[in-house]
Amino acid sequence: MSARILIVDDDPVQRRLLKGTIEREGMIADTADDGNQAVRLIAGADKPYDAVVLDLVMPVMDGLSVLAWMGENNVTTPAIVQTGLGGIETVVKAMRAGAFDFVVKPVSPERLMTAVGHARKAGKKERGGPSGKSGGGFADIVVASSAMDRILSLAKRAAASDIPVVLEGESGVGKEMIARAIQMESARRSRPYVTVNCGAIPASLVESILFGHEKGAFTGAVDNHTGKFVEADRGTLFLDEVGDLSPEVQVKLLRAVQTGEIETVGARDVRKVDIRLISATNKDLIEEVKAGRFREDLYYRLNVFPIHVPPLRQRKEDIPELARHFVRRYVRSAGRAPSMSLAPETLALLTAHDWPGNIRELENAVHRAVVLAEGDTLTADLFPQIAAQLPGYDLSSRQNGRELEEMTWVPPIEYDPVDEPVPAMIGFEHPPIRGQKDPEGALNAIAANGEVRPLAEVEEELIRFALSFYDGQMSEVARRLGIGRSTLYRKLKDYAIDPGKPLKTAA
């Protein structure tokens, strides 16, 4: 069965926009134009809604009144409240009244669907649904690559203590899931687990959300507000996108990490808290420190146990297992046969793609294919947006994935997940020659002065050599160099290499 979302807004244009966004994701969207109608729909529903998107400012019965009714009647459906810019006091009231999340109007489709996705997961856990049965430990993380085995081994060691952890990696690689697994297998597993997406909170609200505020601390602060640090006391606080915090908030965070004390906005006294802190970022924090955007002292306080989670393109062995996992997850909600599977050419196609959006992008692509499929096998033609990004791949002309798999397979990249080095390029003085070819510019790792040549210089020359050696076949060049095609294209741009004329001409 598809997820059902209730949209509550007195603005018909806003209702239509939200409904369209949600339905494009394959969900069912019901609408209510005021709080009274929303209460009737919630109370009369055969099964609970998966989430409620609730406007706060409405005539007759506003959003806060709906939240109060939901609390009084033990309605556990997560509510995402909408507010205009500058509505801090209303947002604080809503969060205290039990709202799960909030979005600022006008909300982007991406931000809305992220909030809805998180709300659905939280709702399933509250009701004991499929996503809440397993507990979110390491056993629930799908891995097949040695790279991720090493990541989980590190994370398990971190879980055995209260050491501060920083999870680094691109968006969508699974940092939040690893953070949750660390908490679930730690001594604080039965204590609160509080998540804060620092990048999704307006700058004016961050300090109040994290540390709380006293009544009268600023205009509109009509009540006391308990911050996330206090909510997480004796438990775990997960700060996602910690690199987005302002310098002012970084100062307070440093004090909290150093002394275990927080200062509520408007309060005279400090408060002691006991938390285990896990942070995550898609930024290079050391570069942020060098640029003056992140405090160096805070960096060293947080970065005690760094774990770098690699992108999906560097652990392609995980792609087939993840794809099968997502098929199993969505066949039930889409009303499809449990026996639905992925064709071999489909697995080859998915494995060939670099997935810049990582696991989140792969999940969305598989979900879409499950909904659109007419039979019990997911064929490659259900992923046209992926095939379109692979040069030379024609859906209509391929009957199986063997050729694609041979052409685009990239060997796994070995690296230290704690301190990832730059891959070394190995030079050779007399490269092997295929057939009758005698390419110019045989690579030499030693400069004329007898010293080792700079890495960038050797790398550029090797790429030029490989392009000439393999007649500009980009997939073959990437495969032989052990890098993804997107990485190869980026390096061509960096070194200003023309694939049609890769070798430098003599001056």
Image (tube, helix red, strand yellow):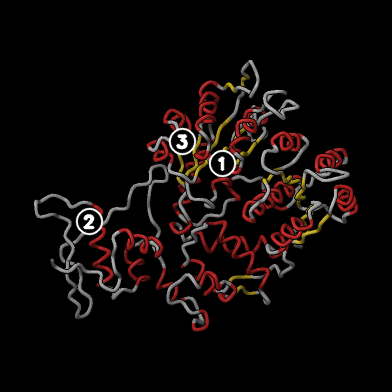
Residue 414 appears at what percent x and percent y?
Answer: 38, 53
Residue 483 appears at what percent x and percent y?
Answer: 37, 61
Give the mark, 2 or 3, whose residue is nearer the N terminus.
3
Real-space CA distance between mark 2 and mark 3, rounded to the nearest whole angstrom: 34 Å
Q: Nearer the viewer, residue 10 or 400?
A: 10
Q: Quadrant of residue 16?
A: bottom right
Residue in the image at 71% along x and 70% along y: 337
In the current view of this chain or complex, which residue is farthest to the top?
Answer: 269
Name the quadrant of the C terminus. bottom left
Instruction: Count every numbered label the image shows and give the total.
Output: 3
As helix, strand or loop, the secondary structure at mark 2 comes to helix
Which mark identifies residue 240? 1
As helix, strand or loop, the secondary structure at mark 1 comes to strand
Query: Where 149 sits versus 98, above or below?
Result: below
Mark yes or no: residue 185 visible. no
Query: Where 485 sits versus 277, above or below?
Result: below
Circle 1 Cα neighbour tier, 10 Å, few/some/many (<14 / 14–19 / ≥20)? many
As helix, strand or loop, the secondary structure at mark 3 comes to strand
- Which residue is tagged 2? 457
Real-space CA distance between mark 2 and mark 1, rounded to the nearest whole angstrom: 38 Å
**Relative horizontal placement of residue 140, taking residue 468 as reference (left or right):** right
- Tell me which amino acid carries mark 2: Glu
Name the quadrant of the N terminus. bottom right
- Tell me which amino acid carries mark 3: Phe
Q: Nearer the viewer, mark 2 or mark 3?
A: 2
Residue 50 appears at what percent x and percent y?
Answer: 76, 53
Residue 136 appears at what percent x and percent y?
Answer: 63, 46
- Which residue is tagged 3? 305
- Tell me which amino acid carries mark 1: Asp
Circle 2 Cα neighbour tier, 10 Å, few/some/many (<14 / 14–19 / ≥20)? few
Q: Nearer the viewer, residue 269 or 183?
A: 269
